[in-house]
Amino acid sequence: MNLNPESNGEAPAPIQPTPPTPTPPICPVWKKCVDDLTDDHLQQVAERRDYRPELCQELRKRNLIGLFQERIAFPIIKYTGEVIGCHHRPFGKEGKWLVTAFTAEQMVMRPLLVNDPFLKPTVAAFESQWDMFAFLDKAGWPEGEVLDIGCVATRGAMNGKLVRHCCLSDARILAFTQNDPDGKKWLRRVAQAAKGEVLNVQIPTDHKDLNDWTRSGATWPVIKAAMDAAEVWKEVQSEVDGQDDEEPESAYEGNTRQVTTKDGRIWVRLPAENRLMSEFASDMGQALAEKEIYNRSGLSFTIDHRNQTFKQMTPDSFRTWVERYAVCFDWEKKKEGPPMRIRKSMTVTDAGTTLASEHFLKRLRQIRKLNQVRLPVLRKSGAIELLPTGYDAESQTFTFETPGLDYPKDMTLDEAKTVLDGLFSEFCFKDDGGLSKAVALSGMLTLYAYGLLPNGALVPCFIILANAEGAGKTLVVKVIVVPILGKFEAGVKPGNEEELRKALLGVVMQGRNCIILDNLKEHLDSPSLEAFLTSTNWTDRILGSNKPFSGEKNTVVFATGNACTVSPDMRRRSLFVTLFMREERAEARQFNCSLDVPYLLEKRGDILSAQWTLINAWNAAGRPPGSKTHSSFPEWTKTIAAIIEHAGYPSPAEIQSVDNSADRDGDDMRKLVNALAPNTLIKKIKFQDLVPFAQEAGAFDALLGGEGEVDRKVRTIFSRILKRYNGRYVGNFIFSIEGEGHNRMYVFKKEGADVSVPPDLQNGGAT
């Protein structure tokens, strides 16, 4: 793409090689860029590229490297020596190159020249300036062995033909080709443009380019040997005949050239005549590729820093939000002179189409998760490390900065346990051998170390039960979540399934790491919550829209209740922390430490460091597996439960005996079995007789009531509950359902009973 549409797509007239002036005037803007580049910046470049610090110092001394808007930058220099702009990228990491013009004239990418290639009989040509600098570094430039070799970095595979502007017409060219398809195209263009001999210097195929080779240990003698072994590239004519893949000289690294305004924003032309919507969407995506707008499940999301959540981008918001980083424009043609850019805001229609466009979305970075503080992650390499702040490409996670937080700290395992034990020391856990405390610790570690689990791993729901108000159930959850999230936000369970599904969708869309259902009453039986706990992705219709959203669920569920009960499906998906308060009145309890939010934030660094120490200790021990497994969340037990157990606590995956009738349906089924005659071996009973039998046994009171007829809806619910137990053990009986319709029988058969014995001889025969 031509950088300057005023030229009407015509390439500039060829510029004949002219030696630069001995002391060309330096552009004030570029001079500031050079002055802004500190020794620390140069050290980072040297370490990342494996250059000698002396080389980087020399580049700065010669005004060949600078810092533009906190991005590493290189000058764009006319052949007369005048700096007319710079191209730049994020400092110290990979990212998109941008171009900023310092003058009003046509902006054309020009090669970067070192060592006066205009005057040398031999020229070393490179596609990338990084390769050229690696060559100069290993040669010991500016002294060294390359005083008679000029150097040219064309800066982009498409710019190979620009070599002809940078050297003598009969110069011998040593072309250092990169090992990729674009490298071959670059070599063809160099050979096509050069008048003199072109030799292809081969880089070993296990290295992508010269700088990659030098970072792996290639020395000057090794490079010199490759130069001596270079062969004349003889296939110039046959390779280029019939090919018309030339692009404007402004092309660079295969991407659309991006030109910035004086304040650093990127110009993006609006859709217009001979300008497709897809082109606009793609260019806008490229302009925003490194900004805080992300592709999440095929929708565009930004980050709400105040609430530390995801926020879906809407067309209305996008129109103005984008103008922080890009300026939309169209060309205004004049009767005289070149056309001028006219700044315009995009329409709502264009904004909505762009946000929905695959051309736009594929340019954005993918994101999966938000972390409120630096948390551990299991890398693809198998290493465990703390994520950096900001965006991490491999894990697709954004981590917020936490100014003033002293973390991580060096701790021994004993010191870490002292910190964690102290947090939970004053809670009245049930006397269960430390199991409730281990589950509480595992809830904290699950929230902290979610990144150690493989994608799609299921985690348990953590339910904190208490025998009375004021036992500290909500405080347990507060201790678990505040050090990791930096805040505490609890809510109550919505009144119906529809409201709950909407709430769960909101949690997923916002990327919240946990949901807290506080102070549950009576019985917890929710198909939506049960499905949420067993889902890796959550799908529902967006509120106020007909569009569905399907997003990855990275949410841990916590619930609290006094003597509440849960359904069997919730029980097997949950782990329980049980508190038992002996005092008659909660206010009679005395705490030595107030575990409120300010205190937990004050101790945040110690608490996070303690959890990090538990993980490191387990990792150093070879990541031993735990002694227990759990069929509902096996990956969780291999990691989180194993870390807790390795630290010396009971395994939180231990099957628990939960008080307060946590499994109400199972408890009621056991009441039916207990109501059978003592010597019953088998009992068959019809549905119409089973209802009064259950009422007399005191089973399913909440559903059936104590006596009397029940309506059709209640009968249907009761029938569904019974169906879930078909073929299962209830105590020492096997419960089964035989027959259909009015002939259906509900059978309680004692384990090992001989059914061949005639019913009239069996105690408790058929009813």
Image (cartoon, grey):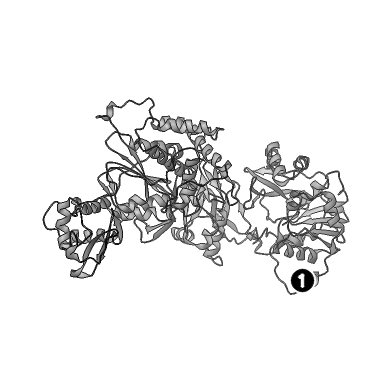
Q: Nearer the viewer, residue 35 or 682?
A: 682
At 48% from the left and 30% from the top, the residue drawn is 418
Residue 647 shown left or right of residue 73 in the figure: left
Please state which of residues 605 and 634 is positioned toward the viewer in this rendering: 634
Q: Is residue 698 left or right of residue 132?
A: left
Q: Is residue 359 left or right of residue 684?
A: right
The answer to whether residue 115 shows anywhere in this view is no
Give how far across and how far down residue 337 sits, in percent: 64, 59
Q: Relative to 663, does residue 691 appear above or below in the rendering?
A: below
Q: What amino acid is found at the position of numbered circle 1 in the picture?
A: Glu
The quadrant in which the N terminus is found is: bottom right
The residue under label 1 is 239
The structure residue drawn at horizontal position 45% and vertical position 33%, both measured from the top left corner, is 420
Between residue 115 and residue 418, name the one nearer to us: 418
Q: Quadrant of the C terminus?
A: bottom left
Q: Position of residue 55 (x, y in %)?
A: 78, 43
Is residue 374 visible to the viewer in this orientation of the structure? yes
**Outermost residue, left side:** 708
Q: Secondary structure at mark 1?
A: helix
Give 31 or 235, whichever is nearer the viewer.
235
Q: Is residue 308 above or below residue 552?
A: above
Q: Quadrant of residue 562?
A: top left
- The image position of residue 472, as x and y in percent, is 33, 34
Residue at (69, 56) in percent of width and height: 108
The residue carrying pointer 1 sits among few (fewer than 14), some (14 to 19) or many (20 or more) residues within 10 Å by Cα, namely: some
Query: Where does the image place residue 313, in percent across and percent down from the top left?
Result: 45, 53
